[in-house]
Image: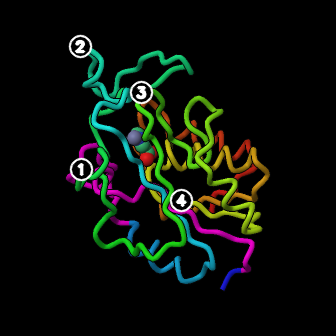
Amino acid sequence: MRPANEALIVIDMQNDFCPGGALAVAEGDTVVPGINALMDEFRAVVLTQDWHPVDHLSFASQHEGAAPMSMTEMPYGPQVLWPDHCVQGTQGAAFHPDLRTNADLIIRKGFRREIDSYSAFFENDQATPTGLHGYLSERGITAITLVGLATDFCVNYSALDGAKLGYEVTVIEKLSRGIDLDGSMAAARKAMRDAGVVLA
Ligand code: VGL
Ligand code: ZN
């Protein structure tokens, strides 16, 4: 059993990010058994859930003529336009059916139409908090281990924000899978390393 100051944060293990889903990550489902087993080691387990309104502005469908996986400019900076995914209340937004959901907290993100939210700590404007930092700090948690989907987006941005907030951050790469859009996997691994994140 890990000490009480350590939390496991399971990022976006949802149907839409698994094979057959709207924004499938290759082999995304293969990490479920390992994540389930790891939950037993931690006294604090948090799940995150990508949770978009049907007209979310990160969806290519909301931008006339835009193709999925193309780029746009939002007021807060560049943004990938995704296929519609993780719409609130749909099966696609539900957790993978085999994922253990006996977590202490489920944090939902990306529910504001105008702002996407990759990180579990801050939305993509880098300013709007999700509340996770308040929760973890009130519980005295100082070290976090991240697993889940996708390595190069939500796991990466959560790890970078966690490091910025002063947490000791570990990403377990074999319990995470990436989208790899235009070299985003290599860029994410370098950014995490540079920020002092341990890639285990
Ligand atoms: C994610 C793209 C869009 C993720 C979420 O969980 O990595 N990626 N929304
Ligand atoms: Zn999303």
Q: Is residue 188 above or below residue 2?
A: above
**Residue at screen point 52% across, 61% down:** 147
Distance Cα–Cα, label 2 vs label 3: 14 Å
**Residue type marked 4:** Glu
Q: Position of residue 20 (x, y in %)?
A: 20, 52
Drawn side of residue 53 relative to residue 2, left or right = left
- Contact flag, marks 3 and 1 (Cβ < 8 Å): no
Distance Cα–Cα, label 2 vs label 4: 36 Å
Mark nearest the camera among 2 and 4 is: 2
- Magenta-colored stretch includes residue 24: yes
**Where, by quadrant of the figure, is residue 192 drawn?**
top right
The disc, 4 or 3, on the residue closer to the chain's N-terminal end is 3
Other residues around mark 4 within 10 Å, as few (<14) / some (14–19) / many (≥20):
some
Of residues 21 and 110, the one nearer the viewer is: 110
In the rendered image, the quadrant that contains the C terminus is bottom right
Q: Which mark is residue 80?
A: 3
Q: Which mark is residue 99?
A: none
- Contact flag, marks 4 and 3 (Cβ < 8 Å): no
- Magenta-colored stretch includes residue 139: no
In the rendered image, the quadrant that contains the N terminus is bottom right
The disc, 2 or 4, on the residue closer to the chain's N-terminal end is 2
**Residue at screen point 74% across, 64% down:** 138
Q: Which mark is residue 173?
A: 4
The disc, 1 or 4, on the residue closer to the chain's N-terminal end is 1
Q: Which residues are magenta?
A: 3-30
The disc, 1 or 2, on the residue closer to the chain's N-terminal end is 1
**Residue at screen point 33% across, 38% down:** 53
Other residues around mark 1 within 10 Å, as few (<14) / some (14–19) / many (≥20):
some
| Badge 3 residue CB within 8 Å of ligand 1 | yes
